[in-house]
Image (cartoon, grey):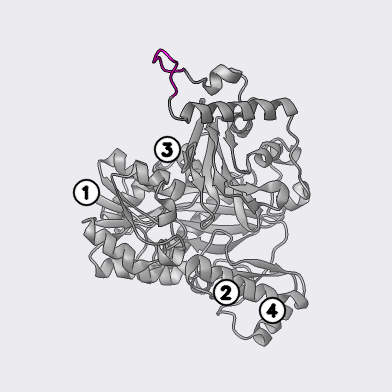
Amino acid sequence: MFSKILVANRGEIACRVIRACRELGVTAAAVYSEADRAALHVARADEAYCIGPPPPLESYLNIEKIIETAKAARAEAIHPGYGFLAENAAFADACAAASLAFIGPSGDTLRLSGDKLGARRTVAAAGIPIIPGMSAAAGEIAEVLAEAEKLGYPVIVKAAGGGGGKGMRIVCGEGELAECLEAARREALGAFGDDTVYLEKYLERPRHVEFQILADNHGNVVHLFERECSIQRRHQKIVEESPSPALDAKLRKKMGEAAVAVTRAVGYTNAGTMEFMLDEDKNFYFLEVNARVQVEHPVTEMVTGVDVVKAQLAIAAGEKLPFAQKDVSRRGHALECRIYAEDAAANFLPSAGKILFLRGPRGPGVRLDSGIYGGYDVPVHYDPILAKLVTWGESREEARRRMAEAIREYIIIGIKTTIPFLRDLVEHPAFVAGETNTAFVTDHFDGWREEVPEVFVEKALAAAAAAELAAAPAKFYADGERAAAPTPWRTVGPWEVGRGA
């Protein structure tokens, strides 16, 4: 195992990787932009290095600066997290050239699997069904218009070099195509440093099902079963679960075998995800390879007991997988809700600013992967994900009820978050029944508005005010005795804060 790793990311995923390093006895070095000087991952790391101004292209996407920092820190490896440079072949190559282990696939594999166009061609050649679409990058508008006409509207413009819903636009008619194409290119360039996009047929209301893969450098490949990620907005996942309510044993086996076949076809190593679309008739189509650890990896960890991040580090260090496919088992059901700094009532508009008060949920079967703290200023420069709330239960309903309760206990005051929206989502009858698809939010929550009892708002604000008072400079009485500032619990009581309706 490595002795020191540089974590080339920020937020909750950087904190997650740092935790794995700590548990393995590995020194974790963090990087941060000037906007992230007070970020949680900086405080959690053993060492931290500033790599530039807030804009990602000048900091978290600055390959030269990150490599230079890793060498100065005497790190042996770099973990890229997700987003930013995680699927960047040039970054993997730069690591290799600097004799640094890249904790992920090789540059050559990333060029194939990370390039969604290349992956589509390779997978189709292996006989695995793919969604109809372009096999080369979109060029002039006349060419793209002709392809869209052949596929039939609606179509979707997708970034070839990244994920996370960035660089994607649904096009319902010819008049929208040129504008959507340019918008997708701009967003892809800003998110991934690559404006390559292509066109696919847009499947309406499918389920999005993915398989977690682990593949070592000795030819061993296993899948850790599936996750369903159908509940999305703007093509970005917001709720994930494992197992999928749509799969039976036969279909699960067939899709798992296809996922392993894709892994071998592209020569993939380390942790990754093979993604599929599942239509109403249970036909599945290869969608893409996500060549990195994913946001939703905790649900897999909760049902299988396999630590995906530790497995990444071990594989990158040259170790063999310690188990075969027959040894992988699953127990219970897990759900994950992504907590974003967004106002769901205002079309998920990002919400930056200071977190005045924070209280996370606790309890059996509850896990919280977070990158924030009370008093933290959420910057405007980056993806708005704050944390991931995960629950486990023996059954889907037990996991769902635990999630509903955990969300009710979760308080973040000072900025808008998706917590109120998620509170309603997990109680919706269609979600309770497992009737999910990629149009779930549009179909059931169009025009959603939060309904919060006035008494809850008053209690929450009182708690926030008390927390601010407690954090203020110490005050003393005339006789020199320190004044005891009221805590949130003394103000409103520990069994009142966060209970909601």
Residue type, numbered disc 4:
Ala
The quarter holding residue 167 reads bottom right
Whole-percent x, y for residue 479 in the image: 40, 12
Mark 1 and mark 2: span between their CA atoms?
Answer: 39 Å
Disc on the earlier residue, 3 or 2 = 2
Whole-percent x, y for residue 310 in the image: 34, 45
Residue at disc 3, secondary structure:
loop
Mark 3 and mark 1: span between their CA atoms?
Answer: 25 Å
Say whether residue 481 is magenta: yes
Identify the residue position indicated by label 3 in the image: 305
Asked whether, in this view, residue 412 is left or right of residue 4, the answer is right
Disc on the earlier residue, 1 or 4 = 1
In front: mark 3 or mark 2?
2
Residue type, numbered disc 2:
Val
Say whether residue 271 is magenta: no
Residue at coordinates 45% horizontally, 58% vertically from top-left? 260
Residue at disc 2, secondary structure:
strand
SS majority, magenta: loop
Asked whether, in this view, residue 388 is left or right of residue 42, the answer is right
Residue at disc 4, secondary structure:
helix
Q: Mark 4: few, some, or many residues within 10 Å (few <14, many ≥20)?
A: some
Per the rendered image, the range of residues in magenta is: 475-483
Identify the residue position indicated by label 4 in the image: 178
Disc on the earlier residue, 1 or 2 = 1
Residue type, numbered disc 1:
Ser
Disc on the earlier residue, 2 or 4 = 4
